[in-house]
Image: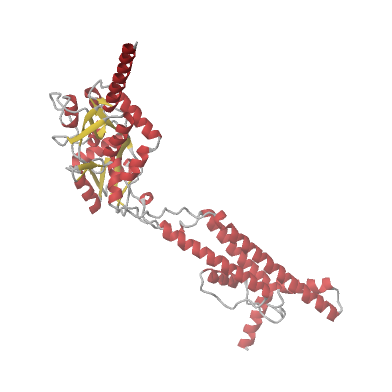
C-alpha cells in the first residue's frame, strides 16, 4: 500500500513538473521588418516604432516570443518575370522567416504567395501640396463674413433706424420746437447719412438734442460697434489658409487644372493603380504624368518638390499624413481613393495567421490601434484656425432685439413729449387736447411742401 501511494505521489509530481516546463516553453518566431519612419526605426541596438509596438501587443495576446531582423535587400517584395519574389515576401516564401511585419499592402498577388492577416491599418491614395497654393480671392469675398440673410437684416435695420430718427426728430418738441418758423435739420436724406456715418464710426452732425433721438442713436452706435467687431473677426478668420481654400481639393480638380505639376513615385503601386484604372479622370492623370515625366525617384524627392511649391505629390494617404505632421507648410487633401490595407505576412497555410487576425481585430475594437496611430503620427504643427462660416442672423438676434427695443423706446418717448406739449398748449389756448394734437401733427408731418416753400422764400429774400 505504501509503495502504491509513493508511485501515485511521484506520478503527480512528474506531471506537475512537465506542465510547468510546458508553460515556460513558448513559441519563438523569426520576424522580418524594414526600416521606415515611423513603422520601424533604430534606437541604439533596439528597434522602435508603430510596427514594433504592434508586434509587442500581439505577442502579449498570443503568448509568443520573437526575434526581429531587417530584410536583407531592403525591399517589401516584388515578383519578377520568372515568378520569384524578392524582399520580405521572398524570405517568407522561402521560409527564411516566420512573419513579415511592415506597411505591406494587401494585394491579390501577395495573397497567392504568402498568408496575410486582416489589415491593421487602412490607407489609400491622396494628394500632398503646399497650403499656400490656394484659390484667387473673389471680387466679393469681403462679403463672406456674413450670410445673405444677415446682410438683408443689417440693411433693414439701417433703414429702420434712419426712418426712426427722421420721425422722432419731427415729432419731438425738444428736437423741433417751432415747426412754423424753423427748418428741421433731420430730413430723411440726412437721417440716412447720419446713420451711415455712425455705422462706420465716422460721425455726421448735427446730433439729436431730444432724449428720444439720443436713445435711438446710442442704441444704433452699440449695434454698429458689435456688428463691426463680428465682421472683422469673421473676415480675418475666413481669410486664413487651410485645406478648404486649396485650389486642388481632389483628383478631379487636379486633372482639370494646368497650373500645378503633379507626379508620383516611379514604379510604385500608386502608379500602377492609375495605369490600370478604367476611370477617365485617373487615366488622364496617368497620361499626363507619363507625358510630362513627372515621376519622382523617392518619397523624399516628392516631399521636397511639394515644399518648393507648384507641385502636387500623389502617394499613400498614411505616409502623406506623416509628412504633413512633420512639415507644417504642407497639407493633404481630404479625398482618398483606392482604399487598401496594411497586413502582416506569414508562411502560406500557417495556423498562426488566424490567431494574429483575431488579435488584430481585438486590438482595433479596444482602441489600441487608434492609440498607436495617434502616438506615432503626432504633429508638432500649430492647428490652423478653422474656416469661419458666414455669420447667420440668429447669431446676432440679441443685438437686433436690443436695437428694436431702442427704436421702439425712442419713438414712444417722442410721442410722449409731443402729447405732453399738446396738453400744455391746449390748457393755455383753451382748446381741446385733440384739436391741438391734430394741429401739431399736421404741421410736423407736412414737411416736404413746407420746407420747399420756406427754402423758396429764403432764396427770394436773398435775391432781393
Q: Which quadrant is home to the N terminus?
A: top left
Residue occupying the far front of the picture: 2
Relative to the observer, which residue lies in front, 454 or 293? 293
Residue 398 image point, x, y percent: 59, 59
Q: Is residue 167 visible?
A: yes
Q: Quadrant of residue 140?
A: bottom left
Does residue 43 sit above or below 175 in this rendering? above
Residue 3 falls left or right of residue 308: right
Does residue 392 sit above or below 454 in this rendering? above
Give the colour scheme shown.
secondary structure
Residue 122 falls left or right of residue 426: left
Residue 129 image point, x, y percent: 28, 49
Q: Is residue 188 visible?
A: no
Q: Which quadrant is home to the C terminus?
A: bottom right
Does residue 2 sit above or below 179 in this rendering? above
Relative to the observer, which residue lies in front, 360 or 143? 360
Relative to the observer, which residue lies in front, 175 or 277? 277
Which residue appears at 25% of the width and 31% of the height?
A: 65
The mark total stands at 0
Q: Quadrant of residue 57?
A: top left
Residue 447 image point, x, y percent: 68, 73
Relative to the observer, which residue lies in front, 6 or 368? 6
Which residue appears at 36% of the width and 34% of the height?
A: 363
Residue 271 falls left or right of residue 154: left
Residue occupying the far bottom of the picture: 464
Does residue 379 sit above or below 278 in this rendering? below
Residue 358 image point, x, y percent: 35, 27
Amino acid at each position: 500500500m505504501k509503495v502504491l501511494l509513493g508511485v501515485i505521489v511521484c506520478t503527480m509530481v512528474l506531471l506537475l513538473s512537465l506542465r510547468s516546463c510546458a508553460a515556460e516553453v513558448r513559441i519563438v518566431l523569426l520576424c522580418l521588418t524594414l526600416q521606415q519612419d515611423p513603422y520601424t526605426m533604430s534606437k541604439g541596438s533596439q528597434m522602435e516604432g508603430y510596427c514594433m509596438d504592434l508586434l509587442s501587443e500581439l505577442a502579449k495576446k498570443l503568448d509568443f516570443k520573437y526575434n526581429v531582423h531587417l530584410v536583407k535587400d531592403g525591399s517589401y517584395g516584388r515578383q519578377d518575370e520568372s515568378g520569384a519574389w524578392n524582399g520580405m515576401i521572398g524570405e517568407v516564401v522561402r521560409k527564411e522567416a516566420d512573419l513579415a511585419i511592415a506597411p505591406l499592402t494587401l494585394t491579390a498577388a501577395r495573397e497567392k504567395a504568402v498568408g496575410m492577416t486582416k489589415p491593421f491599418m487602412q490607407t489609400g491614395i491622396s494628394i500632398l501640396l503646399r497650403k499656400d497654393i490656394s484659390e484667387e480671392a473673389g471680387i466679393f469675398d469681403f462679403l463672406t463674413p456674413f450670410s445673405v440673410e444677415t446682410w438683408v437684416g443689417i440693411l433693414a435695420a439701417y433703414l429702420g433706424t434712419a426712418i426712426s430718427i427722421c420721425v422722432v426728430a419731427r415729432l419731438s418738441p425738444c428736437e423741433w420746437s417751432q415747426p412754423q418758423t424753423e427748418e428741421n435739420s433731420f430730413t430723411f436724406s440726412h437721417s440716412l447719412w447720419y446713420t451711415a456715418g455712425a455705422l462706420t464710426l465716422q460721425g455726421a452732425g448735427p446730433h439729436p438734442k431730444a432724449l428720444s433721438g439720443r436713445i435711438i442713436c446710442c442704441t444704433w452706435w452699440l449695434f454698429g460697434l458689435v456688428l463691426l467687431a463680428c465682421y472683422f473677426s469673421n473676415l480675418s478668420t475666413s481669410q486664413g489658409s487651410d485645406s478648404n481654400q486649396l485650389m486642388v481639393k481632389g483628383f478631379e480638380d487636379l486633372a482639370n487644372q494646368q497650373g500645378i505639376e503633379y507626379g508620383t513615385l516611379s514604379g510604385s503601386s500608386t502608379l500602377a493603380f492609375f495605369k490600370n484604372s478604367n476611370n477617365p479622370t485617373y487615366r488622364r492623370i496617368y497620361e499626363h504624368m507619363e507625358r510630362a515625366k513627372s515621376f519622382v525617384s523617392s518619397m523624399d524627392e516628392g516631399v521636397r518638390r511639394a515644399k518648393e511649391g507648384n507641385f502636387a505629390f500623389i502617394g499613400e494617404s498614411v505616409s502623406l499624413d506623416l509628412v504633413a505632421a512633420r512639415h507644417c507648410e504642407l497639407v493633404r487633401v481630404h479625398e482618398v481613393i483606392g482604399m487598401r490595407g496594411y497586413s502582416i505576412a506569414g508562411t502560406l497555410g500557417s495556423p498562426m495567421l488566424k490567431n494574429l487576425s483575431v488579435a488584430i481585430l481585438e486590438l482595433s475594437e479596444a482602441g489600441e490601434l487608434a492609440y498607436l496611430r495617434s502616438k506615432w503620427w503626432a504633429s508638432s504643427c500649430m492647428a490652423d484656425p478653422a474656416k469661419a462660416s458666414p455669420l447667420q442672423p440668429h447669431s446676432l438676434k440679441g443685438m437686433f432685439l436690443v436695437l428694436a427695443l431702442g427704436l421702439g423706446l425712442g419713438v414712444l418717448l417722442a410721442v410722449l413729449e409731443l402729447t405732453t406739449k399738446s396738453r400744455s398748449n391746449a390748457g393755455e389756448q383753451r382748446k381741446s387736447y385733440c384739436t391741438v394734437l391734430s394741429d401739431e401733427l399736421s404741421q410736423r408731418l407736412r414737411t416736404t411742401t413746407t420746407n420747399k416753400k420756406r427754402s423758396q422764400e429764403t432764396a427770394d429774400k436773398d435775391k432781393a
